[in-house]
Amino acid sequence: MTEGGEYSSAMMSSDPFTSMKKMKKSNHNQRRFSDEQIKSLEMMFESETRLEPRKKVQLARELGLQPRQVAIWFQNKRARWKSKQLETEYNILRQNYDNLASQFDSLKKEKQSLVSELQKLNEAMHQKKEEERQCCGDQAVVALSSTDHESENEENHRRCHEPEEVRPEMEMYDEKGHHGVSCDHHDHDHEDEDGYNNNIKREYFGGFEEEADQLMNIVEPADSCLTSSDDWRGFKSDTSLLHQSSSNYPWWDFWS
DNA sequence: AACATACGTCCTATTACGTCA
DNA sequence: GGTGACGTAATAGGACGTATG
């Protein structure tokens, strides 16, 4: 059953093709509804987007239209309303995306500058330690005039495990700000690595280890996936997710 | 109870036409 | 006056729910 049924008995002739043309022409005699009709239909649509059959008949009678015409008007109205709704939602999502993208960008820049600042500070500290060691080292050489290789090895070992001392050979950072660990004893030992990381946190975030943990949790994933433009663009947006992320956890405020 | 059929409504895509720049 | 873009009433056809035999 098609929806043109209500016109068919009055309009159909023996030839289906010509009768259809006649019907359409006839239907288009009164092409547009009057302003009054539209106004009433709009008012009804605002209160309910779907009409009960009884209301449809009543409204049609009031407006001097066929119930079918009222039904079709509501159908078309729903379709237009839906596409408008989609457009609005798209614009909101687009706006949210743009905001997040720019926030992410500035956060990335801020992190980059902090990393380079950290590098500079490390270099300065390294240089200072080197100077101190040279100064103290000369005196030690005089005191330990006999070369004791065993004690030298012990010293090296101690330095590798010494938590408080900043080891020059470990102060290299890669592009992500990770330490370039060079101590053999730590390469494949996770427990030692954890302890080492804790030491690092103590060194650089002294008194703020918790914040350091948060930072690691937040910044590291951003490094691994969000910096990839493919992953970033492939992100499937979801209004509820966006609302959730923007209202409940303003992660970009972590730094402020 | 399970099934087929008719009927009404919805949705989406499309058509036909009026209007306007 | 011709024309293309746009808005809108209406149609086509498929999907779904409900009533009935």
Image: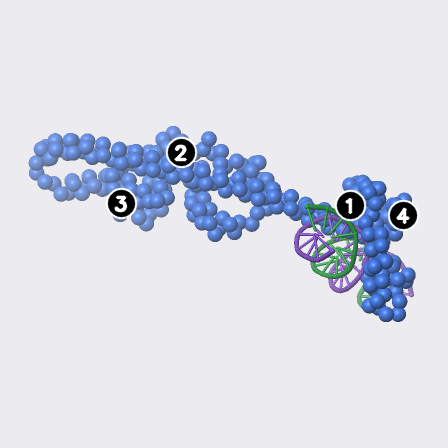
Chain colours: A blue, B green, C purple
Residue annotated with mark 4 = A64
A180 left or right of A8?
left
| Residue kind at label 4, given as amino acid type | Gly
**Which residue was labeled with disc 3?**
A183
Among the two numbered marks 2 and 3 on one chain, the one whose residue lies closer to the N terminus: 3
Q: Is residue A216 above or below residue B1?
A: above
Q: Quadrant of the N terminus of chain A?
A: bottom right
Depth check: C4 or A92 in front? C4
Q: Of callouts 3 and 1, which one flags the residue occurring earlier in the amino acid sequence?
A: 1
Q: Residue furthest top?
A: A207
User: Is label 4 or label 3 in front?
Assistant: 4
A197 to A256, vertically: above or below: below
What is the distance, in whole Å, between disc 3 and disc 1 at their CAs?
71 Å
Residue for badge 1 = A49
Comparing labels 4 and 2, the label whose residue is closer to the camera? 4
Disc 2 marks a residue whose amino acid type is: Glu
Which of pointers 2 and 1 lies earlier in the amino acid sequence? 1
Q: Residues within 10 Å of mark 1 (few under 14, many from 20)?
A: some
Of tags 2 and 1, which is closer to the observer? 1
Q: Position of residue C18 (x, y in %)?
A: 84, 55
Query: Which amino acid lies under the numbered mark 1 shown in the image of this protein?
Result: Thr
> In the structure shown, which secondary structural element does the residue marked by tag 2 occupy?
helix
What is the chain letter for disc 4?
Answer: A
What number is the disc on residue A209?
2
Q: Quadrant of residue A105?
A: top left
> Type of residue at label 3?
Cys
Determine the chain carrying the residue at label 2.
A
Q: x, y (%) of residue A178?
A: 35, 43
Q: Specify whether A168 is left or right of B3.
A: left
